[in-house]
Amino acid sequence: MHHKLIVTEPALNDINHIFEYIAQDNPVAAKKLVDDFEQKFYILVKFPNSGFKPALAKSNVRVCVVAKNYQIIYQIDNEFIVIARILTRYQDVCFEL
């Protein structure tokens, strides 16, 4: 069963900020990173449990690492994969969905 993908407004804002920051120095790398995020989204749709569960998170919250320095924070909600945030590995993942 493939899940349906929902990307939240905060996650879209995160992607835009990351893109703009990297594109200042390297627009090609910024575009590739956005492509990497999108590719990982579709892997999560097929394999929703492929991310890891943070120790203090709710049971349906998972984290998936992209390009070593970024984390996709997502929630498995019945037939949906909800992309909540995209954070750098230096940001704290402690939050409530």
Image (cartoon, rainbow, N blue to C red):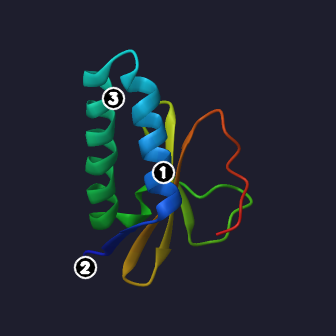
Mark 1 secondary-structure assignment: helix
Contact check, label 3 and label 2, Cβ < 8 Å: no
The location of residue 54, given as percent across then percent down, is 65, 55
**C-alpha distance separating marks 3 and 1:** 15 Å
Residue 84 visible in the picture: no
Give the distance between the C-alpha atoms of the residues marked 2 and 1, in whole angstroms.
29 Å
Instruction: Please tell me which residue lies in front, 12 or 59.
Output: 12
SS for tag 3? helix
Numbered tag placed on residue 40 in the rendering: none
Q: Looking at the picture, which amino acid does disc 2 mark?
A: Met
Task: Read off the residue under disc 1.
Answer: 13
> Residue 1's mark?
2
| Crowd band around label 3 with a 10 angstrom C-alpha radius: few (<14), some (14–19), many (20+) | many
Sooner in the amino-acid sequence: mark 3 or mark 1: 1
Q: Quadrant of residue 15?
A: top left
Picture residue at 51% right of the left edge, 44% below the top: 71
Farthest top residue in view: 25
Residue 46 vs 90, above or below: the answer is below
Which mark is drawn over residue 30? 3
Which callout, 3 or 2, points to the residue nearer the camera? 3
Is residue 20 something one can see in this rendering? Answer: yes
Q: Where's residue 58, x and y in %?
A: 67, 70
User: Viewer-nearest of labels 2 and 1?
Assistant: 1
Asked where in the image residue 48 lies, by quadrant, the reply is: bottom left
- The quarter of the picture where residue 26 lies is top left
